[in-house]
Image (cartoon, rainbow, N blue to C red):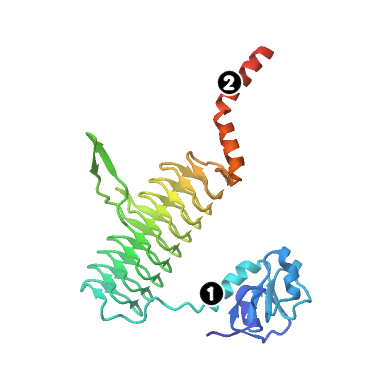
Amino acid sequence: MSEYTLQQLADHVGGEVRGNSQLPILRVATLQSASSDAIAFLANSRYKKQLETTQAGAVLVSPKDDSDEVDNAIIVNNPYAAFAHIAQLLDTTPKPAEGIAKTAVIADSAHIGKNVSIGEYAVIEEGAHIGDNTSIGPHCYVGRETTIGSDCTLWSGVKVYHQCVIGNNCLFHSGAVIGADGFGWAPEGGKWVKIPQLGRVIIKDNVDIGASTTIDRGALDDTIISSGCIIDNQCQIAHNVFIDEDTAIAGCTVLAGSCRIGKRCMIGGASAINGHISICDDVQIMGFAMVIKEITEPGVYASGIPAASHREWRRNGARFRQLDDLFKRVKELEKKAD
C-alpha cells in the first residue's frame, strides 16, 4: 500500500496545505466513512455540515468551503477532480494478470512488448502487436493483426477481433467485445443477404470501455472512438460511428450506425441516438432521451416521460391520444374567432 504525506498530495494536485503537511495518508474515503489515515473530499457545499463529524485525517476543500472544523486540509479549486487524481495515486486495484501464463496461446508471429502480462487461457493470434506494460486478463482474445498499444488493461473475457487498432493507456472491462460485425444486411426477395463488414474499430489513446459494451467494426470505413472518451457498461456502438474527443456515454446507451458525436458531449444512460445523424460539440443529452434528428447547437436536450403514479400515467396517456383531436378543435375555434 502506498503512503504519501499531505504535502506530497497537495503538490500533486496543485493545492495548498492547511495543518500538518507531514501527515501520512494511505487511502481515500468519503467524509462519513473516513478514518484518520484517509483523505476525504467536500465537492458540494450542501454537505459542509459533515465536516463537523468526519474522522478523516484530512479533507480536500475549495477556498469557500474551508472550515476550522477539520484540522488538516488541502485547499484546491476543484476538490472532486483533486480527489480523482489522488485516488489514482493510492489505487490498490491489482492487474488482471501477472507474467505470462503457461496456458496462454500466443502465435509465433505475434509481437509482445516489454513487461506485458497475459492471463490463463488468453489467445493472441497471428500478427497481433501488444505494446509495453499492457496487461491482458484470463480468457481474453486478441485477433489477427490487431494492435494494442502500451499501458493498456484488458480485464477477463475481453474480445478484440481482427485488425482492430487500440491506442495507449486504454482500459477494457470484462465482457467488452471490440470489432464484431456491424448489423449490415441487404433485403432481397423477402430474405436477407449479409454484407461483410470490412472496416475496423480504431480506439485512440486514454479511452475507457465498460463491461459488456460492444463496439462494431465498420462496414467499409472504420468505427472510430477518439482520445479521452469514456463509455459505460452495456452500451452498443454500431458500425461506422464516429465519437470525437472527451465524450462521455452512460450505461445502456445505443448509438445507431454512422452517427457522429462531437467533442465533450455527455450522453445520459439508456439513450438512443438515430443512425446517420450528427451531434455537435458540447451537447448534454439527458437519460432515456431518443435523438432522431441532428443537433447543431450546444446545450442540454431531453425527452422521455418521467415516472408517475399508475393512475396519473393512465390519465395522461388518455389525454395524449386526444391531442390531435384537441388541436383540430382549437384550429376550428380560431377560424371562427377570425
Rendered location of residue 263, percent (x, y): 51, 52
**Three-letter code, disc 2:** Lys
Above or below for 42 versus 253: below
Real-space CA distance between mark 1 and mark 2, rounded to the nearest whole angstrom: 60 Å
Give neighbour class at mark 2: few <14, some 14-19, many 20+ (Cα, 10 Å): few
Q: Which residue is mark 1?
A: 88
Q: Which mark is residue 232?
A: none
Q: Quadrant of residue 84?
A: bottom right
**Three-letter code, disc 1:** Gln
Asked whether residue 338 is in view, the answer is: no
Rendered location of residue 217, percent (x, y): 32, 53
Give neighbour class at mark 1: few <14, some 14-19, many 20+ (Cα, 10 Å): few
Q: Which residue is rendered at x = 58% and y = 41% of the image?
A: 313
Q: Which residue is mark 2?
A: 328
| Secondary structure at numbered mark 2 | helix
| Secondary structure at numbered mark 1 | helix
From the image, which quarter does the C terminus lie in? top right
Q: Which residue is rendered at x = 29% and y = 72% of the image?
A: 122
Q: Which residue is rendered at x = 46% and y = 45% of the image?
A: 273
